Image: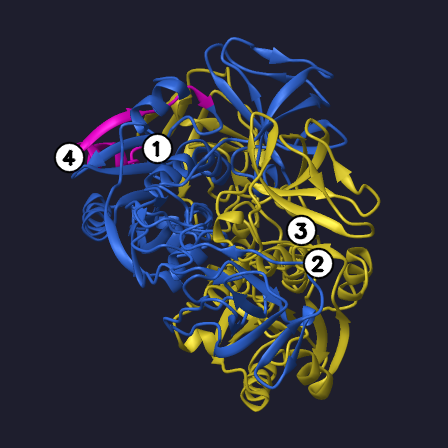
Chain colours: A blue, B yellow
C-alpha cells in the first residue's frame, strides 16, 4: 500500500500528445499543439482609425481625388493638396500623414474645406498590432474568446491542437444486471466531461474474468485511458487485479487514503487504467484525487486544486499514515462533515469539498481549521 | 446614453424558461427544471455493508440456510440459529440483527462457526440514505458528478431540464466580403460556448438594410437571442438602430463605458437582440459585461464576476460619468494596461482581465489599487 503522494508520482509519468487539425470554428476550449506565427502584418496596411480624409500635409483646402471603403485593396497615392476619402478601417493612400475627421470638414463639389483643426487623428501603421513573423500564440495555449479572433484575422482556417483523450468506461458486477443500478459509469462519465475529455461507455461486464477481459481489451483498442469500477477488492469475485496483471502491469493497488483505499492503477499497452472501487463515494473521491488531474494533464489543460481553510463542526478521527478526505458541506466558513458511509449517495451529494486530515495528523477536533479541496 | 448599471437593470428583465426532457446520460452540466422527489427508499431494503452471514441473534454457531448476492431480490427470513450468507450490498433476510464478517467464521459443511466476535458490522437500514418522498434535488440544481448518481439510483431515465438557449450570430459589413476577416462572429460564438449556450452562425450581411433585416428575421425565428456586430454607430452605413426600431424596440443605444460605448440592445418578438460595435475590443468587452451574464442567466446557471485588487503600473485617465474597463495583464499583483486601441487585437489578446475605473473616479494613478474583473 502506497501513499497518495507516491501514487501521484506514478501518475505523473503519463502523457498524451496525439494531435489533430481542426477548423478554427471548432477550436474554442482546445489547446494549440503548435506555435502560431503571423504570416502577415496586422493591419496589413496603414489603416484609418476614423471616417475622414487622408491628406499628405496640413492645408485649409483639398481636392478630393478618390475614395476608399473598409476592405478595399486600392493602391492610391496623394501629394500636395490632394485628399482621399477613407472609411474607418480603410487603407490610406501612400504619403498619408493625417486623416481629417469628416465632421471637421465641408464638401463643396470635389473640394474639401477644413473647418476645424482641433482633432487630427492618427493612423494605425501597418504591423502596429501584429508584426509578420511574430509568435502570436504559443504551443500549449488554450483557445479562448480573446485569442480566437487572432486566428481568424490571420486567415487561418485549421489549427493543430491536442486530441481530446477518449476515456473507456466499464462497470463490473452481476448485481448491475439485477436490482442494482449502475451509478458509477454515469458519475465517472461526468468527471470525464468535466475534464473536457470524451467518455465512451463500453457497457457492464458480469463477474466473469473473460467477460471483463474482453471489455478491457476493447477499451484499450478504442480509447486512450480506461476506467473500470467494481471488482477491485480481495473478494472471490474481485477479478480486476488479476486481469490487469495479465493484460498489462499493476502500478499500484491500494492507497493509504479513505475513502478510496482499494483503488488499482496500471497500464495496458502504455495506456493508463484505473480500477475504481465499486462504492460510489470511494469511486468519486478517487476520481477527484487521481482521475481528474490526470485527464486534465492528458488534455493539456491547467489543473489546480482550489483549497480553502474552514473550521470543522465536529471531530474527525483518522488512522496513522492514512490521508482522510472527508466530504464536507461549507456554510459561513464552517465545514460540516456529510460522510455517512462510502456506499451512501448522500455522503457526497450535497458536499462542497473534501476536508483533508493529513497522514500525520491522526485527528482534528471540533473547531480546528482544516484544508478543504473545493469541488468546482 | 445610459450608465452600465441602468443597462444591466434593463437586461435583468429578460428570462428564458423553455424546458425539455433529456436522457440522464446527456444531463451533465444541465440545470434541472423540476424537483426530483425520490419514489423509493435508498437502500430499497436493509442492506449488508460487508460480505458475511446475516443472523437474528448472537450465537457461536449457525446453520446456513441460503445465500444472497448483491442485486438479488429474495425475501428470506431467519430465526434462531439460522443464518444466510450475504454479499456486500445484498438484501438481508427478515429478522437480521447483525452481519458477521465472513473472515470471522469457519464453514464446516452447512455449519458456520464464529471464531471472532470482535467486529459485528451494522446493516444499512432501508431508506437510511434517501427516504421515499424526499425532495432529493431541487429545481434549478446544476447536474454534476456528485448528483447524477442519485438520478441513476432512482432509476430515472429522463429529466426535465432548461433548454440551452440558441444564439443567432450575424456579422455585418461589406468589408467582410473583401480583404477584412470576420473576427467578431468567432469571438462572440466563443463567449456563447463559454456560457454553455449554442451558437448558430447565420452568416454575414452586406451593408444593405434589407439584407441585414432578412438575417435578423431568420435569427428571430430560429434562435432565442440574437447578436449582431458592426453597423451600430451613427455613420451612413450604420443601419442597425433603424432596423431594430422597425422590427422591434430599442431598449438602449450607447452606454457610458469605454470601450464598448456604441452598443445597442433591444427586443424583437420578446427576444433580446444585442448589436455589438464592430471593433473587436469593444465587441469583446460588451460581450463580457452584458452578453455573458445574460446568457448565463438564460441558461439558469450561476454567474458571478470574479474581482481581484491589483496595483496599476501606469496612470489611466477616464471621462466623467464613464465606466472605463481597461484590459490589463496581471503579474505579481500589478496590472499592466494592454489597451492600444479598440481595433487592435493585441489590446486584449494577452489580457487577464478588465481594470475598472468607476464613473466618478476620473483617473487612477500609477500605484493606485484598482478592481480587476478577471477573465475565467
Question: In the rendered image, which quarter contains the C terminus of chain B?
Answer: top right
Task: Tell me the residue at 69%/39% (across/down).
Answer: B316
Using the numbered discs, state the Cα–Cα distance from disc 2 to disc 3 in whole angstroms. 44 Å
Q: Are marks 4 and 3 on the same chain?
A: no
Picture quarter containing residue B68?
Answer: top left
Using the numbered discs, state the Cα–Cα distance from disc 4 to disc 1 in whole angstroms. 35 Å
Using the numbered discs, state the Cα–Cα distance from disc 2 to disc 1 in whole angstroms. 106 Å
Using the numbered discs, state the Cα–Cα distance from disc 4 to disc 2 in whole angstroms. 83 Å
Question: In the rendered image, which quarter contains the N terminus of chain B?
Answer: bottom right
The chain holding disc 3 is B
Please rate how many residues cluster around mark 4, counting C-alpha atoms within 10 Å: few if below 14, some from 14 to 19, many from 20: few
Labels 1 and 3 touching (C-beta < 8 A): no
Give the residue at the far bottom of this rendering: B210
Query: Is A96 situated above or below A369?
Result: below
Q: Are marks 4 and 1 on the same chain?
A: no
Task: Tell me the residue at 42%/16% (across/down).
Answer: B115
Which residue does the numbered mark 1 point to in the structure image? Answer: B110
Picture quarter containing residue B114?
Answer: top left
Which residue does the numbered mark 2 point to in the structure image? Answer: A118
Which residue does the numbered mark 4 point to in the structure image? Answer: A246
- Per the image, label 4 sits on a secondary structure element best described as helix
The chain holding disc 1 is B
Span colored in magenta: A235-257
- Per the image, label 3 sits on a secondary structure element best described as loop
The dot on residue B303 is: 3
Observer-side mark, 2 or 3, equals 2
The chain holding disc 2 is A
Amino acid at each position: 500500500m502506497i501513499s497518495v503522494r507516491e501514487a501521484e508520482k506514478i501518475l505523473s509519468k503519463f502523457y498524451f500528445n496525439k494531435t489533430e487539425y481542426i477548423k478554427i470554428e471548432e477550436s474554442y476550449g482546445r489547446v494549440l499543439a503548435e506555435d502560431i506565427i503571423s504570416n502577415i502584418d496586422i493591419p496589413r496596411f496603414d489603416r484609418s482609425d476614423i471616417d475622414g480624409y487622408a491628406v499628405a500635409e496640413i492645408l485649409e483646402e483639398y481636392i478630393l481625388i478618390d475614395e476608399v471603403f473598409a476592405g478595399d485593396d486600392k493602391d492610391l497615392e496623394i501629394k500636395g493638396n490632394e485628399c482621399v476619402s477613407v472609411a474607418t478601417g480603410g487603407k490610406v493612400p501612400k504619403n498619408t500623414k493625417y486623416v481629417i475627421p469628416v465632421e471637421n470638414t465641408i464638401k463643396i463639389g470635389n473640394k474639401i474645406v477644413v473647418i476645424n483643426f482641433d482633432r487630427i487623428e492618427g493612423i494605425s501603421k501597418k504591423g502596429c498590432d501584429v508584426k509578420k513573423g511574430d509568435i502570436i500564440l504559443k504551443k500549449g495555449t488554450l483557445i479562448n474568446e480573446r485569442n480566437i479572433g487572432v486566428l481568424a484575422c490571420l486567415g487561418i482556417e485549421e489549427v493543430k491542437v491536442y486530441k481530446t483523450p477518449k476515456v473507456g468506461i466499464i462497470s463490473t458486477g452481476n448485481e448491475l444486471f439485477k436490482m442494482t443500478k449502475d451509478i458509477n459509469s454515469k458519475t465517472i462519465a461526468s468527471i470525464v466531461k468535466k475534464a473536457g475529455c470524451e467518455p465512451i461507455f463500453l457497457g457492464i461486464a458480469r463477474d466473469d474474468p473473460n467477460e471483463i477481459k474482453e471489455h478491457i481489451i476493447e477499451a484499450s483498442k478504442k480509447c486512450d485511458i480506461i476506467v473500470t469500477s467494481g471488482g477491485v477488492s480481495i473478494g472471490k469475485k474481485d477479478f480486476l487485479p488479476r486481469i490487469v496483471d495479465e493484460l498489462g502491469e499493476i502500478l499500484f493497488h491500494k492507497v493509504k487514503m479513505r475513502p478510496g483505499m482499494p483503488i488499482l492503477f496500471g497500464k495496458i499497452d502504455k495506456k493508463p487504467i484505473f480500477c475504481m472501487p465499486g462504492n460510489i463515494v470511494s469511486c468519486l473521491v478517487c476520481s477527484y484525487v487521481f482521475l481528474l488531474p490526470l485527464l486534465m494533464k492528458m488534455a493539456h489543460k491547467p489543473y489546480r486544486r482550489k483549497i480553502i481553510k474552514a473550521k470543522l463542526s465536529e471531530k474527525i478521527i483518522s488512522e496513522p499514515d492514512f490521508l482522510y478526505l472527508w466530504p464536507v458541506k461549507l456554510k459561513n466558513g464552517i465545514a460540516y462533515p456529510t460522510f455517512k458511509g462510502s456506499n451512501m449517495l448522500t455522503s457526497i451529494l450535497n458536499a462542497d469539498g473534501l476536508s483533508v486530515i493529513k497522514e500525520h495528523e491522526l485527528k482534528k477536533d471540533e473547531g480546528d481549521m482544516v484544508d478543504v479541496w473545493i469541488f468546482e
